[in-house]
Image (cartoon, helix red, strand yellow):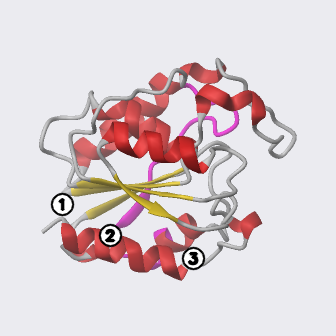
Amino acid sequence: MRTSDVDILIVPGWSSSGRDHWQSRWERSLTTARRIEQVNWYNPNREKWVANIVAAVVKATRPPVLVAHSLGCIAVVHAAQKLPRGLVAGAYLVAPADVDNAAAWPVTEGYTFDRDHGGFAPLPLLPLPFPATLVASQDDPFCSIERARELATAWGASFVDGGMSGHINVASGHGPWPEGLLRFGSFLKGLG
């Protein structure tokens, strides 16, 4: 598959993805990409986030591919069991946020996120019903590389070690993130 063959649904995480974030750049540059908006990016609610993901997938006119970052990955995993079977072509999960260990997360734009915040914990550990790739960093303050490997295994996702890349966001120097776009292209090719 190519980007023109799919609807690329961008799923940002907690606090959304600012203008210079790779997700926002992809949204602007890939013609079939669009962001799944949430009502409140700083006080997320799992049920509302999941409902918005399900609605966007159902409205897709081409096979949908979810491109999630951070808490967006967790929202996708929660949504997976509620999505119509066989509809999602795949999910590209980047820097998942380990909500089961949220007490260790750094303060983000003045906000803290505790384990019970928004109903995202505990993390589902069921295999995803669609192909997925999980890209993780060795020094992500929101999820250890060991935990990311465990999640990829539980979800049946292929695992990519992204090296020392922080949270794979603007703060860690990943505004454009060309390597990620190349990996995403390879992921799409593997979908058929």
Which residue has dot 3 on it? 177
Q: Earlier in the sequence, mark 2 or mark 3?
A: 2
Any mark on residue 77, and which? none
| Secondary structure under the numbered disc 1 in the rendered image | loop
Q: Nearer the viewer, mark 2 or mark 3?
A: 3
| Secondary structure under the numbered disc 2 in the rendered image | loop
- Amino acid carrying label 1: it is Arg
The quarter of the image holding the N terminus is: bottom left
The residue range painted magenta reads 27-45
Residue 90 magenta: no
Give above or below for 154 relative to 116. below
In this picture, residue 72 sits left or right of residue 15 = left
Foreground of the two, 99 or 176: 99
Q: Residue at x 53, y 64 (%)?
A: 23
Which residue has dot 2 on it? 32
Whether residues under marks 2 and 1 lie with C-beta atoms below 8 angstroms apart, the answer is yes
Give above or below for 172 relative to 35. below
- Res. 40 image quadrant: top right
Q: Earlier in the sequence, mark 2 or mark 1?
A: 2
- Amino acid carrying label 3: it is Trp
Is residue 65 visible in the rendered image? The answer is: yes
Q: Position of residue 3 (x, y in %)?
A: 28, 74
Q: CA distance from mark 2 to mark 1?
A: 9 Å
Whether residues under marks 2 and 3 lie with C-beta atoms below 8 angstroms apart, the answer is no
Q: Nearer the viewer, mark 3 or mark 1?
A: 3
Any mark on residue 62, and which? 1
Give above or below for 166 relative to 155. below
